[in-house]
Amino acid sequence: MLKYNVRGENIEVTDALRSYVEKRLKKLEKYFNLNQDVIAHVNLKVYRDHSARVEVTIPLPYLVLRAEETTDDMYRSIDFVSEKLERQIRKYKTRVNRKSREKGLRDFFVETPKEEEKKPGKFDIVRNKQIGLKPMDPEEAILQMNMLEHDFFVFQDAETNGTSVVYRRNDGRYGLIETNE
């Protein structure tokens, strides 16, 4: 179980701020396979330019998880730090579990179920977007796609008035999908 040691520099740690830190870091507990308590050391700091820095250190047997982030909003910094820590855990859990098995101990991190192991036929839609299709040619659509840093772009073809999709192929070139309307 995670316990929290939250300190503030140039900022008063309010109950709301403390509970937000605990709520965000509590999501990490699902990865741990621990019997003892683990202390998350959280340092919140505000600078003169009103930027907010969050540092989190979680000392564990065999490794230390640490992340820090500075943004213009304390809550956003907390969000970014918790995401960084979760990425670290996912990245290193196999290596840490292998080392603990070599030493004759049980796995340190819990293996989370993979996406493929979900029930067949069930798809989780995690985001829904509605867009207005602007008439343009495929070259303009490719430019828009690249500016947005996406791998595909849906648009209305100015020549045919049909809905089309441009996409980036694995070889770095582009593809075009046109509808038959």
Image: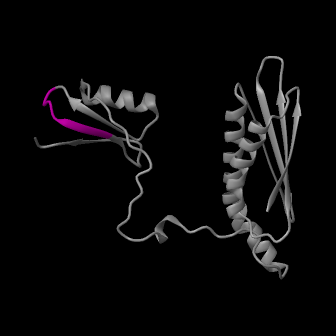
Of 147 and 9, nearer the camera is: 9
Q: As drawn, is 16 to the left or to the right of 144?
A: right
Give the percent coordinates (x, y) of residue 171: 41, 47
Q: As drawn, is 4 to the left or to the right of 131?
A: right
Give the percent coordinates (x, y) of residue 44: 83, 35
Say which residue appears at 72% left-offset and 39% top-offset: 78
Of 133 and 126, nearer the camera is: 126
Extreme front residue here? 15
The correct choice, above or below, for 30 with respect to 133 in the image is below
Say which residue appears at 17% left-offset and 42% top-offset: 179
Extreme top residue here? 49
Q: As drawn, is 87 to the left or to the right of 125?
A: right
The correct choice, above or below, for 61 with respect to 70 in the image is below
Quadrant in the rendering for residue 13: top right
The correct choice, above or below, for 89 with respect to 142 in the image is below
The segment highlighted magenta reads 159-166
Say which residue appears at 68% left-offset and 58% top-offset: 91
Quadrant in the rendering for residue 105: bottom right
